[in-house]
Amino acid sequence: MTYVCVHRVFYGYLHKENESHSTAEVESAIREFQWLSQLPVTGGLDRVTLEKMSSPRVQDAWGQRVSRVFTGRQLRKKHSPQTGEKWHKRHLTYCIMNWLCNLSPSHVHMAVKMAFQLWSNVSRLNFQELQQGPADIRLAFFEGEHNDGTGNAFDGPGGALAHAFFPFRSEAHFDLSERWTMNGLKGHNLFLAHEIGHTLGLVHSLVRHALMSPYYKKMGSNALLSWDDITALQQMYGKQASNFLSELLKSFLLFVIL
């Protein structure tokens, strides 16, 4: 298979790898990628498209393949997920299943807490961490194939960094092979809050600077959540009664990738 075919199979734009794909199918897959990435939709594998393909990104959440989105042009059309892909309660629990040995457990728990708070600050949701027992949302590190299907297998350093599942499975998986750290100087990606967004039922956004864009954005001076992120969540779960702002708190700790 060509480079583009391998890429599309991995991220779910085409079907199984052992199937043959016509030129028209490959061109359609390229168009889907270009449309989602807000590139000129030509169907050709030009330099800009190849560069975008090689940039770190998230894998598509279970059940939300881009081909499905592209066909119906329904990505964030009404700021709501498909039926059954949202929680029908406001109090959610989460559990951190494991973490890397080089990361401080206390820092990990604080980083996760702050990532959840980013979403609770702008909605009626509230979150509680559980140390044991069944939780609504589960976070874990995995390496390579981890029983999610070959399409969701991690590919080692670079490429896909994490993926998540919509309710009611609501798990977020992070690639154990990446060089994770806390508060690093490079690659300040808000991937943790992004994946949590998927576990709440949020799909990828076409807004370039949205937290839920399929390509991780780097930390900047602007608000962490765009209007698109906030509107999508509030139409699902309602607005926060208080006037919280979605700004970076001084105590906000980040998982980052070097």
Image (tube, rainbow, N blue to C red):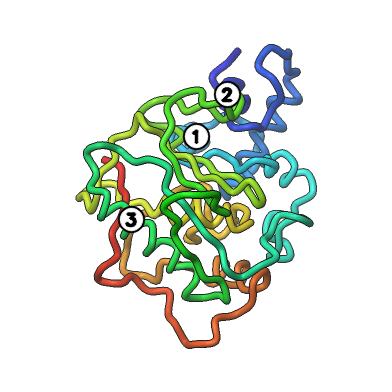
Q: Which residue lies under the disc numbered 3?
A: 109
Residue plotted at (56% across, 75% down): 123
- The reply to whether callout 2 and callout 3 are in contact (CB within 8 Å) is no
Q: Which residue lies under the disc numbered 1?
A: 53
Q: Nearer the viewer, residue 37 or 104?
A: 104
Indicate the quadrant containing the C terminus: top left, top right, bottom left or bottom right: top left
Number of numbered discs visible in the structure rendering:
3
Q: Which residue lies under the disc numbered 2?
A: 4
Q: Nearer the viewer, residue 39 or 226?
A: 226
Q: Quadrant of residue 116?
A: bottom left
- The reply to whether callout 2 and callout 1 are in contact (CB within 8 Å) is yes
| SS assignment at label 2 | helix
Residue type at numbered disc 3: His
The spot of residue 34 in percent (x, y) is 60, 41
Residue plotted at (59% across, 58% down): 200
Say whether disc 3 or disc 1 marks the residue closer to the N-terminus. Answer: 1
Disc 2/disc 3 C-alpha distance (Å): 39 Å
| SS assignment at label 1 | helix
Q: Is residue 173 visible?
A: yes
Say whether disc 2 or disc 1 marks the residue closer to the N-terminus. Answer: 2
The spot of residue 19 in percent (x, y) is 73, 14
Residue plotted at (30% across, 42% down): 257
Disc 2/disc 1 C-alpha distance (Å): 9 Å
Residue type at numbered disc 1: Met
The spot of residue 164 in percent (x, y) is 55, 44
